[in-house]
Image (cartoon, rainbow, N blue to C red):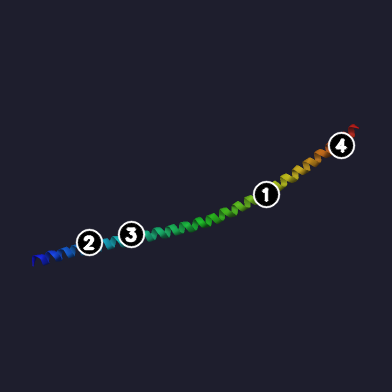
């Protein structure tokens, strides 16, 4: 009879411990789920931000190309102007 009481008490203690561990596990699962949801939201926000940054980079690249083209045209215009001025100076000297 004493062994039966001890076994019953041990079983009850193990049941309580098991229930406590199950409750802790559920809490941890809920926390992990919330953390995962937050991470998914942040990942989505980062992806959107990345798209915005990529679009800005493309705008910057287009502006850089346009500036290079203008610089090339100015350089050609300057060269032609300088040649014309030199030609006129030499012609006037003659």
Q: Position of residue 1 (x, y in %)?
A: 8, 67
Q: Of 74 and 4, which appears nearest the observer?
A: 4
Q: Position of residue 81 (x, y in %)?
A: 81, 40
**Residue 28 disc label:** 3
Q: Secondary structure at mark 1?
A: helix
CA separation, marks 2 and 3? Answer: 16 Å
Residue 63 relative to residue 77: left or right: left
Q: Going by the picture, which residue comes out furthest to the left? A: 1
**Residue 88 disc label:** 4
* Between discs 2 and 1, the one toward the N terminus: 2
Q: Secondary structure at mark 4?
A: helix
CA separation, marks 4 and 3? Answer: 88 Å
**Residue 79 disc label:** none
| Contact flag, marks 3 and 1 (Cβ < 8 Å) | no
Residue located 53% across and 55% down the image: 49
Give the residue at mark 1.
65
CA separation, marks 2 and 4? Answer: 103 Å
Residue 68 relative to residue 39: left or right: right
| Contact flag, marks 4 and 3 (Cβ < 8 Å) | no
CA separation, marks 4 and 1? Answer: 34 Å
Residue 17 relative to residue 39: left or right: left
* Between discs 2 and 4, the one toward the N terminus: 2
Mark 3, residues whose alpha carbon is within 10 Å: few (<14), some, or many (≥20)?
few
Mark 4, residues whose alpha carbon is within 10 Å: few (<14), some, or many (≥20)?
few
| Contact flag, marks 2 and 1 (Cβ < 8 Å) | no
Residue located 75% across and 46% down the image: 73
Give the residue at mark 2.
17
Does 69 appear above or below 91?
A: below
Q: Secondary structure at mark 3?
A: helix
């Amino acid at each position: 009879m004493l062994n039966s009481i001890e076994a019953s008490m041990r079983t009850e203690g193990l049941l309580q411990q098991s229930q406590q561990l199950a409750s802790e596990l559920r809490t941890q699962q809920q926390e992990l789920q919330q953390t995962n949801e937050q991470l998914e939201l942040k990942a989505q926000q980062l992806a959107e931000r990345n798209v915005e940054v990529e679009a800005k980079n493309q705008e910057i690249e287009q502006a850089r190309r346009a500036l290079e083209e203008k610089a090339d045209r100015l350089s050609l215009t300057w060269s032609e102007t300088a040649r014309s001025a030199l030609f006129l100076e030499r012609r006037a000297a003659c």
